[in-house]
Structure formats: structure tokens, C-alpha cells
Amino acid sequence: MKCGALKTDPPSSHPSKTRHSWYSIGQSTGTYITVFSRIPQLGGITHMSDKPIQNFEEFWPFYVREHSKKATRIFHFIGTTAGGAAGIAAIALKRPALIPLGLAVGYGAAWFSHFFIENNRPASFRYPLWSFQADWVMWAKMLAGTMDAEVERAMNAEHASNGQNGAGKYDDHATSHTTYAGTNGVN
């Protein structure tokens, strides 16, 4: 398939993808694949609309979609584990100087994955407390083995809310920018 030119969606074209750039890579027999590069842009993070998220229940699906690639989630898991261990060590050893180290390690790994793997802006820039809470929820779900299903559910729900019908399958490739491959209403 041949890549199209980089374009920026106007706000009315893809409401959930405003301020994000996209590539159209092909159309064949009812299958249309769009690749969202999710290049961080000035002006903050958007979700479904530009209205601010009001509570953690609204934030969680947004957070999950912003962590759609498995490699991003692995970096978060490692960073959260190391940061949590440094926090526990700071308390146990009565060495508060370890707390900034834990934050640096935890956020460093997470932010690296957002900038270089997921290609988006960390949610902690706009929603720091909910992001911290969501990091631990994701950590627990990864430990329990349920996070991949959570990501698939959130990505498919976003696809459905964009008015696209039909069966589709969320595609998680850590090295590509593919966010969703679906039938775009053609069965």
C-alpha cells in the first residue's frame, strides 16, 4: 500500500482526533485503514471533544486509549514498579531523598514511551492526579493479565462512537502507528 500525505484533521472531520495528524494508507474491498500518528500538538490533550474530563470514570477510557501500544504499557509497568519500590524504600529506610528518584524513574520511563513509542503527550501533563491513579490501575490490570482486553474494549468503543459500524479489530503493533483497522461500515 502506498502512504498518502500527512494531513491535519479539521475539527469537524474527526471530532475525537482533532489536533492529531493522520495518514491514509489504503482502501480495498470495503476495508479502509487510517493510521493516526498522534503527534503531540500545542494546546493540550483532546478526547472525544475539547471539554475537560470531569471525573475518573470519564478519564479512564481516555487514558487507556492513550496507552494503546503494548510497549508503552510495558514501559509504564516497569517505571511504576521502580517508582513504587523507591517510594517504599524511602519510607522503610526513612530516606525521603529517594522519593524524587522514584518519581524521576517512574515518569521518565512513562514519558519516554509516550514521546517515542505512542507518539502522544502524556496524560499527566493535563490530569496529573488521575493519571497517577490510572497508572496504578493499569499496573494492577497488567499484573492480573486483563489490561490487553481493556485496551481492545476502549479502542473498539472509540471506533463505534465515531459512527463506524461493522466488525473491526484493534491492531496493536508497537512499531507501527496503526490504531484501528476496521471495515468502516461495510460488511
Image (spheres, helix red, strand yellow):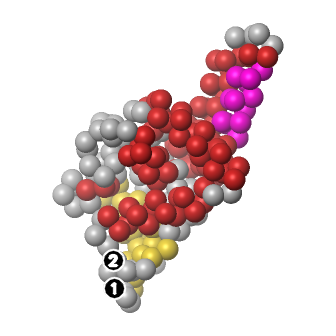
Please provide percent x and percent y for residue 19: 30, 48
Q: Secondary structure at mark 1?
A: loop
Q: Residue at x 69, y 29 (%)?
A: 84
- Residue beneath disc 1: 186
In this rendering, the answer to whether 15 lies above or below 138 is: below
Q: Seen in the image, is 77 located left or right of residue 129?
A: right
Q: Residue at image x 18%, y 57%?
A: 12
Vertical placement of residue 100 versus 183, above or below:
above
Disc ID at residue 175: none
Lateral position of residue 98 relative to residue 65, left or right: right
Q: Which residues are magenta?
A: 78-89
Q: Is residue 175 left or right of residue 160?
A: right
- Quarter of the rendering occupied by the C terminus: bottom left
From the image, state whether disc 1 or disc 2 is nearer to you: 2
Cα distance, mark 1 to mark 2? 8 Å
Residue 61, magenta (yes or no): no
Tag 1: amino acid: Val
Q: Residues within 10 Å of mark 1 (few under 14, many from 20)?
A: few
From this viewpoint, is residue 8 visible?
no
Which dot marks residue 165? 2
